Amino acid sequence: MMKYLSIIRNCKVAQRWSFSHATCALSPSPSFSSKWNCKRLMVRRLGTDIPTEDRNYYITTPIFYVNASPHIGHLYSAVTADYLHRYKLLQGFNSRFATGTDEHGLKIQQAADAAGQDPLSFCTKVSERFKHLFKSCHISYTDYIRTTEERHRCAVEHFWTVLQSKGFIYKGNYEGWYSTQDESFLTPSQVGDAKDSSGKEIKISLESGHKVEWMIEENYMFRLSEFRSRLQEWLEGNPRAVQPERFHHAVLQWLQEDLPDLSVSRQRSRLQWGIPVPGDLDQTIYVWLDALVNYLTVAGYPDTHSQWWRAAHHVVGKDILKFHAIYWPAFLLAADLPLPQTIHVHSHWTVGGKKMSKSLGNVVDPLERSQRFTIDGMRYFLLRQGVPDTDCDYDDDKVVKLLNAELTDSLGGLLNRCTAPSLNPAQVYPHFCSDSFPSQGTEAHKGRAVDEDYHMLDAVRALPAVVEQHYESVHVYKALEAINRCVRQTNGFVQRHTPWKLGSGDGRDQLWLDTILHVSLECLRMYGTLLQPIVPEMADKLLSRLGVKPEEKSWAALDFLVKYQGKDCPFEGRALGPDTGVLFNRLERPNAEKGKPKKAKKATKVKS
Ligand code: ME8
């Protein structure tokens, strides 16, 4: 049955995507207009042909522990889920986006004790910090869940009862290693020797480096070992269930190893801060079982979850892959619930090569950085620089260099040039003249466009499909790299034709000047539309400056340069929006400038 469902699901996805690619592939050497049509068809299909239930999209972040304040790594997961949510909305999906905080367990109990506070007030305080960060950074979540909420307790109790009634939970004796920092049970092969700061011999988790302790307890066990082959089947039948591919392989590899039953409760005498096991008040439900169910709680479990649960996608850091790609699917299979569609895994932000983490005390404050580099600046940097497959080192200097180069100079410079009153005194979206920029082929020699200009059109026309592909696979940096490459090409186009030398009153020159500006603004409209999920405020500023109306900002409006095809362009002749200043202000380099006399450097601005 599972296999059958996954085949149907894969077919639907394949249909949706192959539609565009197949159309493209039919043309041996697709011309600008045939590739163009292919794109239009795909957008139309996304807009109208998908059955309503397939238009739901439910994206989640991990729920974060409240033992300390949020850092850049947490913001990265949230920004990743946020762009997916915004992107899906722009495509016309009904999208739901959940984030929140994980508030139970020994680690939180100990942190609250250490702070001398009662656990709930402690959790509330830190949970509010996460909420504040996310709101400040324009994380547009639709649901914020705290595991101390009543609705969640009901969902967890119900879920537990289902697993127990189906015979997947039994009382047993757990004897083995436990890491409180990771809230994780470990097998002997996952444990190694180390010394603590006082030189004492200790045992640590080989994966996280956190200290582990031997524990012997009578508690409830989940029959995880029974699920090995079903998990393998799921992964083999759904090669894109865990992305990127290397993590998919990692999970399959783990499934070849020992998969013992999992302890899913702790004795109440040791852990009071959690949800009691239904019917046995001496035991508290294991915090990971409790936490994972949050995704169902938000979806409306146990009463109204099916509509959203079928559309669930998770964003997680690689540190919690095992919990999401082994324990969670096993719990869901046991409860007869569908498995998540995708688990998008990302690697870690490091500082000086070490994972940024609360326990190592090397965290970068995301709120302070988003004030210093702006919210969109931080969002852009994290998504442009973060690579899902490999860890990425955080460095303020890198942030400044990247944002100055790509947002201030490249994109901001292009917008400035093309909207400057000196080139565009009427402040309108200028007219396109097909005699100046005729269709490629026999007519081309009659116009003023050169080969590179046609290459640029090809690249920008192909851009939405390229960006979509990378947004879908969460290789955002590749999408942003592609956009940035096109922005550079458009800057090259403007530079090549020096429009500032064309405003001499000669009629033909004026038509060519208008055409250069029209093409450039069309390119900018594409970039602004595609960048909305990443830098919402900046993209909005850009599109508003071009005079694009709110209803023209969706994915369906990614029709590039329709005048080139002889069709009417709704923007032509329309007044530009008001000039609200430079798109992205140049940032000061953090340390390099210290001690040097400061030379005020402004964003490139063409004289008006
Ligand atoms: O594990 N780089 O919570 P947590 C990138 N409550 N991302 C990072 C990161 C880093 N250096 N550090 C943390 C938990 N993250 C559980 C989750 S879900 C049902 C329960 C991000 O506060 C990344 O997404 O330790 C990682 O997986 C998550 O925060 C861990 O957050």
Image: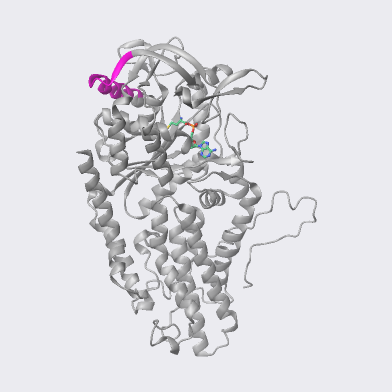
**For the magenta stretch, what is the residue range?**
153-171
Quarter of the image holding residue 72? top right
Residue 237 vertical placement versus 586 (above, below): above
Left or right of 353? Residue 573 is left
- Say whether residue 298 is magenta: no
Total numbered badges shown on the rendered structure: 0
The image's colour scheme reads one colour
Residue 155: x percent and y percent?
31, 26
* Residue at 25% from the left image edge and 58% from the top image edge: 48
**Helix, strand or loop for the magenta stretch, by majority:** helix
Residue 492 vertical placement versus 179 (above, below): below
- Say whether residue 161 is magenta: yes
Left or right of 213? Residue 334 is left
* Residue at 53% from the left image edge and 40% from the top image edge: 348
Residue 193 vertical placement versus 515 (above, below): above
Residue 520: x percent and y percent?
49, 72
Q: Is residue 17 visible?
A: yes
Q: In which quarter of the image is the C terminus?
A: bottom right
Looking at this view, is 97 or 474 the one in front?
A: 474
Residue 521 vertical placement versus 177 (above, below): below
Quarter of the image holding residue 572? bottom left
Residue 169: x percent and y percent?
29, 19
Q: Is residue 183 visible?
A: no
Looking at this view, is 545 or 245 the one in front?
A: 245
Q: In which quarter of the image is the N terminus?
A: top left
* Residue at 53% from the left image edge and 90% from the top image edge: 506
Residue 154: x percent and y percent?
31, 23
Looking at this view, is 507 or 469 the one in front?
A: 469
Looking at this view, is 606 or 457 the one in front?
A: 457
Quarter of the image holding residue 435? bottom left
